[in-house]
Image (cartoon, rainbow, N blue to C red):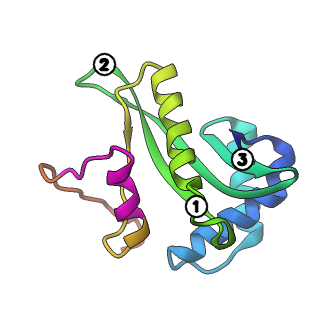
Amino acid sequence: MKIREAIEEDLKELSLLFDAYRVFYRQTSNLEGAKDFISDRLSLKDSKIFVAAEKDKLYGFVQLYPQFSSTQLKRAWLLNDLYVSPEARGQQLGVRLIERAKVLAVATKSVGLMLETEKWNTIGNNLYPKTGFILDELHNFYYWDIKK
């Protein structure tokens, strides 16, 4: 299986994976919304998406958003989305997608990658330390939700 950057021709397959990813995080399936969202990311080039592909079939993806570290005066990357389809799990695709994200971080001379996942996500919470991520226990994470 090849890990490569997503292209416009991947939109249909990638939208299906992205919708499944959202459902994994307890969102209501919205294939049209997923397609529109991914189409915007690809056309606006405001994220980097890498896919695990074999022929015309996609089995997983990682999506990263650029950020900046003011204190370190460099770019940083937010690994926002990582998903491997259930039929392709156990083949190290998550690890390979993360490794491709690390190549991007090095190539762009960034400070590195950051991510968050929910505490119940045992797959992710087991995977990330195995790929070199360190759990940040020094900082508090806050968010403001416009809907509340």
Numbered disc 2: secondary structure: loop
Q: Secondary structure at mark 3?
A: helix
For disc 1, the marked residue is 83
Q: Provide the residue designation for mark 2.
A: 73
Instruction: Reply yes or no: does residue 135 show up in magenta.
Output: yes
Q: What is the three-letter code of the residue carrying label 3?
A: Asp
Quadrant position of the C terminus in the picture: bottom left
Q: Residues within 10 Å of mark 3 (few under 14, many from 20)?
A: few
Determine whether 32 is above or below 71 in the image. below
**Where, by quadrant of the figure, is residue 57 drawn?**
bottom right
Q: Residue 40: give its label.
A: 3
Distance Cα–Cα, label 1 vs label 2: 30 Å
**What's under tag 1, amino acid-wise?**
Tyr
What residue is at 25 percent from the left and 47 percent from the top?
Answer: 134
Task: Name the foreground residue: 54 vs 114.
Answer: 54
For marks 2 and 3, give the CA distance. Answer: 28 Å
Task: Estimate the x, y position of residue 80 in percent, counting from the top left.
Answer: 48, 51
Which residue shows up at 76% across the image and 39% down it? 43
Image-based side of 60 in relation to 80, left or right = right
**Residue 17, relative to residue 100: is it above or below?**
below
Q: Residue at x 83, y 43 (%)?
A: 8
Please state the extent of the stretch shown in magenta in the rendering.
Answer: 124-136
The local secondary structure at tag 1 comes to strand
Q: Going from the N terminus, do you reach mark 1 or mark 2 first? A: 2
Query: Which amino acid lies under the numbered mark 2 shown in the image of this protein?
Result: Leu
Q: Position of residue 37 (x, y in %)?
A: 68, 56
